[in-house]
Image (cartoon, helix red, strand yellow):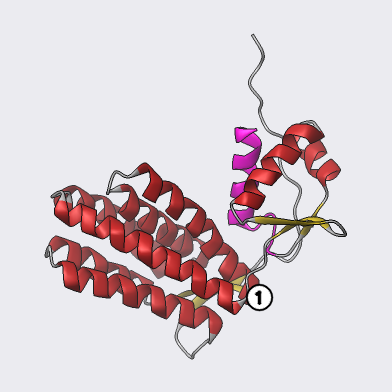
Amino acid sequence: MDLIAGRLRQAIFEGTLPAGAPLGEAELAEQLGVSRGPLREAAQRLVQERLLTTTRRRGLAVISMDAATVADVYLGRTAVECAACRVVLRDNLVDRTVRTLTRVHQRMVRANKRRDAHAVGDTDIEFHQALVDAAGSPRLSASIATLLIETRLCTYSLDRQFRVRADMPDSHAEIIDAIAARDEPALLAVVERHMAEAARRLTAPTEVDTISSPAPAAPRPLDPLELPLDD
Protein backbone atom coordinates (compact mmCIF):
# COMPACT_ATOMS: atom_id res chain seq x y z
CA MET A 1 0.00 0.00 0.00
CA ASP A 2 2.89 2.38 0.72
CA LEU A 3 4.12 1.98 -2.86
CA ILE A 4 0.67 2.74 -4.25
CA ALA A 5 0.19 5.79 -2.02
CA GLY A 6 3.65 7.05 -2.97
CA ARG A 7 2.93 6.70 -6.68
CA LEU A 8 -0.39 8.54 -6.34
CA ARG A 9 1.29 11.38 -4.40
CA GLN A 10 3.98 11.68 -7.06
CA ALA A 11 1.39 11.71 -9.84
CA ILE A 12 -0.52 14.51 -8.12
CA PHE A 13 2.68 16.48 -7.57
CA GLU A 14 3.74 16.11 -11.20
CA GLY A 15 0.29 16.93 -12.54
CA THR A 16 -0.21 13.49 -14.08
CA LEU A 17 -3.38 13.50 -11.98
CA PRO A 18 -4.45 17.17 -12.25
CA ALA A 19 -6.29 19.24 -9.65
CA GLY A 20 -10.01 18.46 -9.67
CA ALA A 21 -9.63 15.39 -11.91
CA PRO A 22 -12.12 12.55 -11.23
CA LEU A 23 -10.42 9.20 -10.72
CA GLY A 24 -11.78 5.72 -11.33
CA GLU A 25 -10.65 3.04 -8.87
CA ALA A 26 -10.81 0.24 -11.41
CA GLU A 27 -8.90 2.22 -14.02
CA LEU A 28 -6.17 3.27 -11.59
CA ALA A 29 -5.80 -0.26 -10.25
CA GLU A 30 -5.43 -1.61 -13.78
CA GLN A 31 -2.84 1.02 -14.73
CA LEU A 32 -0.76 0.36 -11.62
CA GLY A 33 -1.12 -3.41 -11.87
CA VAL A 34 -2.65 -3.81 -8.40
CA SER A 35 -5.95 -5.06 -7.03
CA ARG A 36 -8.70 -2.65 -6.07
CA GLY A 37 -8.47 -3.38 -2.33
CA PRO A 38 -4.94 -2.01 -1.80
CA LEU A 39 -5.66 0.82 -4.24
CA ARG A 40 -8.71 1.81 -2.20
CA GLU A 41 -6.71 1.73 1.06
CA ALA A 42 -3.94 3.88 -0.46
CA ALA A 43 -6.50 6.33 -1.81
CA GLN A 44 -8.09 6.67 1.63
CA ARG A 45 -4.69 7.54 3.06
CA LEU A 46 -4.45 10.40 0.54
CA VAL A 47 -7.99 11.48 1.46
CA GLN A 48 -6.75 11.80 5.06
CA GLU A 49 -3.79 13.84 3.77
CA ARG A 50 -6.23 16.18 1.96
CA LEU A 51 -4.82 15.33 -1.48
CA LEU A 52 -7.86 13.37 -2.66
CA THR A 53 -11.54 13.76 -1.93
CA THR A 54 -14.36 11.27 -2.16
CA THR A 55 -18.11 11.69 -2.51
CA ARG A 56 -20.92 9.20 -2.94
CA ARG A 57 -21.86 10.58 -6.36
CA ARG A 58 -18.46 11.38 -7.89
CA GLY A 59 -16.20 8.85 -6.22
CA LEU A 60 -12.52 9.78 -5.99
CA ALA A 61 -11.12 13.07 -7.26
CA VAL A 62 -7.96 15.10 -6.82
CA ILE A 63 -8.49 18.07 -4.52
CA SER A 64 -8.92 21.46 -6.19
CA MET A 65 -7.85 24.48 -4.14
CA ASP A 66 -9.79 27.71 -3.74
CA ALA A 67 -8.36 31.00 -2.48
CA ALA A 68 -9.19 30.28 1.18
CA THR A 69 -7.50 26.89 1.01
CA VAL A 70 -4.42 28.39 -0.62
CA ALA A 71 -4.15 30.91 2.22
CA ASP A 72 -4.47 28.08 4.76
CA VAL A 73 -1.75 26.01 3.03
CA TYR A 74 0.66 28.92 3.23
CA LEU A 75 -0.33 29.58 6.85
CA GLY A 76 0.63 25.98 7.62
CA ARG A 77 3.88 26.30 5.69
CA THR A 78 4.77 29.47 7.56
CA ALA A 79 4.29 27.77 10.93
CA VAL A 80 6.30 24.67 9.97
CA GLU A 81 9.14 26.47 8.22
CA CYS A 82 9.53 29.11 10.93
CA ALA A 83 9.66 26.34 13.55
CA ALA A 84 12.37 24.57 11.54
CA CYS A 85 14.35 27.80 11.20
CA ARG A 86 14.31 28.32 14.96
CA VAL A 87 15.66 24.80 15.49
CA VAL A 88 18.42 25.28 12.90
CA LEU A 89 19.62 28.41 14.67
CA ARG A 90 19.13 27.08 18.21
CA ASP A 91 20.95 23.79 17.58
CA ASN A 92 23.82 25.39 15.64
CA LEU A 93 22.97 23.63 12.37
CA VAL A 94 23.65 26.75 10.34
CA ASP A 95 26.77 25.82 8.36
CA ARG A 96 25.42 22.47 7.17
CA THR A 97 22.04 23.99 6.31
CA VAL A 98 23.61 26.83 4.34
CA ARG A 99 25.71 24.37 2.32
CA THR A 100 22.69 22.21 1.51
CA LEU A 101 20.44 25.11 0.56
CA THR A 102 23.18 26.75 -1.50
CA ARG A 103 23.53 23.62 -3.66
CA VAL A 104 19.79 23.60 -4.35
CA HIS A 105 19.82 27.35 -4.98
CA GLN A 106 22.57 27.03 -7.57
CA ARG A 107 20.43 24.58 -9.53
CA MET A 108 17.48 26.95 -9.20
CA VAL A 109 19.55 29.76 -10.69
CA ARG A 110 20.59 27.58 -13.64
CA ALA A 111 16.97 26.51 -14.27
CA ASN A 112 15.87 30.12 -14.05
CA LYS A 113 18.40 31.14 -16.69
CA ARG A 114 17.00 28.41 -18.97
CA ARG A 115 13.47 29.77 -18.31
CA ASP A 116 12.46 26.24 -17.30
CA ALA A 117 9.39 26.82 -15.13
CA HIS A 118 9.00 23.24 -13.93
CA ALA A 119 12.69 22.92 -13.02
CA VAL A 120 12.53 26.19 -11.06
CA GLY A 121 9.37 25.00 -9.33
CA ASP A 122 10.93 21.65 -8.49
CA THR A 123 14.00 23.27 -6.95
CA ASP A 124 11.72 25.57 -4.96
CA ILE A 125 9.99 22.53 -3.48
CA GLU A 126 13.33 20.81 -2.85
CA PHE A 127 14.69 23.95 -1.16
CA HIS A 128 11.86 24.20 1.34
CA GLN A 129 11.87 20.47 2.07
CA ALA A 130 15.62 20.65 2.70
CA LEU A 131 15.17 23.66 4.97
CA VAL A 132 12.70 21.81 7.17
CA ASP A 133 14.65 18.52 7.02
CA ALA A 134 17.68 20.39 8.37
CA ALA A 135 15.90 20.71 11.72
CA GLY A 136 15.98 16.92 12.13
CA SER A 137 12.35 16.63 13.19
CA PRO A 138 10.48 13.73 11.54
CA ARG A 139 7.12 15.34 12.27
CA LEU A 140 8.06 18.71 10.80
CA SER A 141 9.50 16.93 7.74
CA ALA A 142 6.35 14.85 7.27
CA SER A 143 4.15 17.92 7.65
CA ILE A 144 6.04 19.96 5.07
CA ALA A 145 6.11 17.05 2.62
CA THR A 146 2.30 17.05 2.43
CA LEU A 147 2.08 20.84 2.46
CA LEU A 148 4.49 21.04 -0.48
CA ILE A 149 2.34 18.69 -2.56
CA GLU A 150 -0.63 20.89 -1.63
CA THR A 151 1.45 23.88 -2.74
CA ARG A 152 1.82 22.35 -6.18
CA LEU A 153 -1.93 21.70 -6.24
CA CYS A 154 -2.49 25.39 -5.42
CA THR A 155 -0.60 26.30 -8.59
CA TYR A 156 -2.46 23.76 -10.71
CA SER A 157 -5.86 24.77 -9.30
CA LEU A 158 -5.73 28.52 -9.82
CA ASP A 159 -3.76 28.97 -13.03
CA ARG A 160 -4.01 27.39 -16.47
CA GLN A 161 -0.25 27.80 -16.72
CA PHE A 162 2.41 26.43 -14.41
CA ARG A 163 3.89 29.76 -13.44
CA VAL A 164 6.79 30.81 -11.21
CA ARG A 165 8.23 34.23 -10.45
CA ALA A 166 11.30 35.11 -12.49
CA ASP A 167 12.93 36.54 -9.36
CA MET A 168 12.46 33.35 -7.33
CA PRO A 169 16.22 32.78 -6.91
CA ASP A 170 16.54 36.21 -5.29
CA SER A 171 13.95 35.53 -2.59
CA HIS A 172 15.56 32.19 -1.76
CA ALA A 173 18.99 33.81 -1.54
CA GLU A 174 17.53 36.10 1.14
CA ILE A 175 16.59 33.06 3.22
CA ILE A 176 20.10 31.61 2.92
CA ASP A 177 21.68 34.94 3.84
CA ALA A 178 19.49 35.32 6.92
CA ILE A 179 20.37 31.80 8.10
CA ALA A 180 24.08 32.44 7.53
CA ALA A 181 23.82 35.66 9.54
CA ARG A 182 22.19 33.73 12.42
CA ASP A 183 19.66 36.55 12.67
CA GLU A 184 16.44 34.92 13.90
CA PRO A 185 14.12 37.96 13.66
CA ALA A 186 15.34 38.71 10.13
CA LEU A 187 15.06 35.06 9.08
CA LEU A 188 11.52 34.66 10.37
CA ALA A 189 10.51 37.93 8.72
CA VAL A 190 11.96 36.79 5.38
CA VAL A 191 10.15 33.44 5.54
CA GLU A 192 6.86 35.06 6.51
CA ARG A 193 7.14 37.60 3.68
CA HIS A 194 8.09 34.86 1.23
CA MET A 195 4.95 32.86 2.13
CA ALA A 196 2.64 35.88 2.11
CA GLU A 197 3.85 37.01 -1.32
CA ALA A 198 3.47 33.50 -2.77
CA ALA A 199 -0.10 33.17 -1.48
CA ARG A 200 -0.98 36.64 -2.71
CA ARG A 201 0.39 35.95 -6.19
CA LEU A 202 -1.79 32.86 -6.50
CA THR A 203 -5.00 34.37 -5.15
CA ALA A 204 -4.69 37.95 -6.48
CA PRO A 205 -2.32 37.83 -9.47
CA THR A 206 -0.28 40.96 -10.06
CA GLU A 207 1.85 42.10 -12.98
CA VAL A 208 5.22 40.56 -12.20
CA ASP A 209 7.71 38.87 -14.49
CA THR A 210 7.05 35.14 -14.54
CA ILE A 211 8.25 31.99 -16.26
CA SER A 212 5.49 29.64 -17.35
CA SER A 213 4.67 26.41 -19.12
CA PRO A 214 1.30 24.70 -19.79
CA ALA A 215 -0.37 23.12 -16.78
CA PRO A 216 -1.86 19.62 -17.07
CA ALA A 217 -5.49 19.60 -18.19
CA ALA A 218 -6.48 15.93 -18.07
CA PRO A 219 -5.25 12.80 -16.27
CA ARG A 220 -2.53 10.81 -17.99
CA PRO A 221 -2.13 7.03 -17.58
CA LEU A 222 0.11 5.91 -14.73
CA ASP A 223 2.98 3.49 -15.32
CA PRO A 224 2.63 0.07 -13.67
CA LEU A 225 4.27 -0.32 -10.29
CA GLU A 226 7.28 -2.61 -9.96
CA LEU A 227 6.02 -4.66 -7.04
CA PRO A 228 8.44 -6.72 -4.91
CA LEU A 229 8.32 -10.46 -5.53
CA ASP A 230 7.01 -12.65 -2.73
CA ASP A 231 9.57 -14.95 -1.12
Q: Which residue is mark 1?
A: 160
61 vs 64: above or below: above
Residue drawn at point x = 29 percent, y = 56 percent: 84
Give neighbour class at mark 1: few <14, some 14-19, many 20+ (Cα, 10 Å). Answer: some
Q: Residue furthest top?
A: 231
Tag 1 secondary structure: loop
The quadrant of the image that shows the C terminus is: top right
Quarter of the figure with residue 75: bottom left
Given residues 55 and 228, the one toward you in this image is 55
Residue 171 point in image, percent of width and height:
31, 73
Residue 172 point in image, percent of width and height:
31, 68
Tell whether 154 sits left or right of 179: right
Q: Residue furthest bottom?
A: 207
Tell whether 193 sits left or right of 27: left
Residue 50 point in image, percent of width and height:
61, 57
Which three-letter amino acid code belongs to the residue tagged 1? Answer: Arg
Q: Is residue 179 visible?
A: yes
Residue drawn at point x = 27 percent, y = 74 percent: 190
Q: Which residues are magenta?
A: 1-19
As for residue 6 lying within the magenta part, the answer is yes
